[in-house]
Amino acid sequence: MKEALLISACFLGRRCKYDGGSNLLPRELLERLRARYRLIPVCPETAGHLPVPREPSERRNGGVYGRDGADVTAQYERGAQTALALCERFGCRKALLKDRSPSCGVGAVYDGTFSHTTVPGDGWTAEQLRARGVALYGESTAEALLA
């Protein structure tokens, strides 16, 4: 049986991005990932009941806030819990997540000023997955999953 890989749903073409788009990965990369892993898609933001489209959000002061100032931390927490439950249910020990996302960012996220400035850190869901021992990869390091 293939190893399960939690993967950002937007990478598979799901239109769950804040602006209603997706972040579809290149076909060749997706084919290679599908050949090696059982892909378990999740969008923590929509799993947290945020709409599509929605205001962009960024991490700030220990929470997550929309560009309009709305505190959406509770929705991000709900989505993170869904991602954790999927990891547990399917035995995911690795996750491929969207770089710089306030929920999925791995190692760097936007700084909360909506100025496209990044700072070291993980997104809300990524932080919780890492704390549970899940190995995290962003699309910029996806090839390492295939080495």
Image (tube, rainbow, N blue to C red):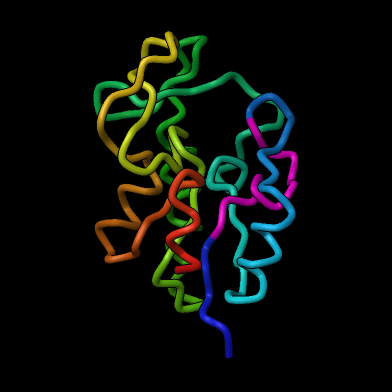
Residue 69, picture quadrant: top left
Q: Which region shows up in magenta?
A: 7-17
User: In the picture, residue 22 is in which quadrant?
Assistant: top right
Seen in the picture, residue 39 relative to 12 is either above or below; the reply is below
- Dividing the image into 4 quarters, which one contains the N terminus? bottom right
Residue 125 position in % (x across, y down): 40, 47
Query: From the viewer's perspective, is 71 left or right of 55?
Result: left
Classify 69 as above or below 7. above
Q: Residue at x 32, y 40 (%)?
A: 122
- Indicate yes or no whether the magenta region holds residue 34: no
Residue in the foreground of this view, choosing between 140 and 57: 140
Residue beneath the point at 74% across and 46% down: 14
Picture coordinates of residue 147, whole percent (x, y):
45, 68
Marker count (numbered)? 0
The answer to whether 54 appears left or right of 126 in the picture is right
134 or 37: nearer the eye? 37
- Closest to the observer: 40 or 108? 108
The residue located at (53%, 75%) in the rendering is 4
Percent x, y of residue 39: 62, 68
Residue 31: % across, % down:
71, 65
